[in-house]
Image (cartoon, rainbow, N blue to C red):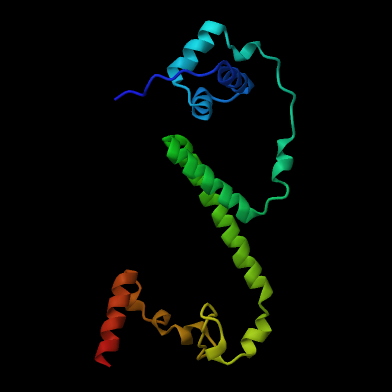
């Protein structure tokens, strides 16, 4: 079924023309003013709405808009743009915003993790009893002075040197089961 026939006022068409000539895409103008795409294109052709006849816009530093935004807010903005692109059915734009969102999200997570690590005092954590240490704190058990004392499977077993890692692990499991 097709859309019903829509008649728009001259004011609506004037606003649509202004939006189109300022740089909005035809699809955006149609969505904003509830105009059919073919009707907009026909009127633009008939009335001579040509963007290249317009004066060049003055260059603006619109990066100042983002100066007061924190990285988590940029992640949220990218997510909203992703959702809007999906709602419009613009797959390429959605894929682009998804990559931007993933990159920003990873950066925010990395910064938060680094800030958390920086805020921890290693000496304080080492002084705590093991049950009070965070789960991510490494629990190393050093039983000898030499690395070969800790990792006995890397000792002087020359007959295992030509085995793959998986085969060495399988043999180690078998040895543990027997003992």
Quarter of the image where one finds residue 158: bottom left
* Nearer to us in this view, 173 or 95: 95
Q: Tell me what residue is drawn at x 63 percent, y 84 percent.
A: 125
Q: In this view, does 44 lie above or below 95?
A: above
Q: Tell me what residue is drawn at x 36 percent, y 24 percent.
A: 3
Does residue 164 appear in the picture of this structure? yes
Q: In this view, does 17 lie above or below 139?
A: above
Q: Quadrant of the C terminus?
A: bottom left
Q: Is residue 36 above or below residue 103?
A: above
Residue 128 in the image, given as x and y percentages of width and height = 61, 90
* Nearer to us in this view, 8 or 119: 8
* Nearer to us in this view, 93 or 155: 93
Please tell me how many numbered marks the rendered image carries.
0
* Residue 173 relative to residue 123: left or right: left
Residue 27 in the image, given as x and y percentages of width and height = 49, 26
Does residue 163 appear in the picture of this structure? no
Residue 2 in the image, given as x and y percentages of width and height = 32, 23
Q: Tell me what residue is drawn at x 67 percent, y 54 percent.
A: 70
* Nearer to us in this view, 8 or 102: 8
């Amino acid at each position: 079924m097709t859309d019903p026939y829509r008649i728009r006022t001259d004011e609506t068409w004037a606003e649509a023309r202004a939006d189109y000539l300022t740089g909005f895409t035809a699809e955006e103008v149609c969505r904003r003013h509830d105009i059919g795409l073919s009707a907009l294109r026909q009127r633009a052709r008939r009335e001579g709405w040509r963007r290249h006849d317009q004066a060049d816009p003055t260059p603006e530093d619109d990066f100042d808009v983002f100066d007061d935004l924190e990285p988590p807010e940029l992640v949220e903005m990218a997510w909203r743009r992703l959702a809007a692109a999906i709602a419009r059915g613009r797959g390429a734009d959605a894929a682009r915003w998804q990559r931007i969102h993933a990159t920003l999200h990873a950066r925010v997570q990395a910064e938060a993790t680094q800030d958390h690590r920086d805020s921890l005092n290693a000496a304080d954590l080492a002084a705590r009893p093991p049950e009070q240490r965070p789960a991510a704190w490494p629990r190393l058990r050093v039983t000898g002075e030499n690395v070969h004392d800790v990792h006995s499977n890397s000792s002087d077993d020359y007959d295992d040197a030509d085995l793959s890692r998986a085969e060495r692990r399988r043999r180690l499991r078998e040895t543990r089961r027997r003992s």
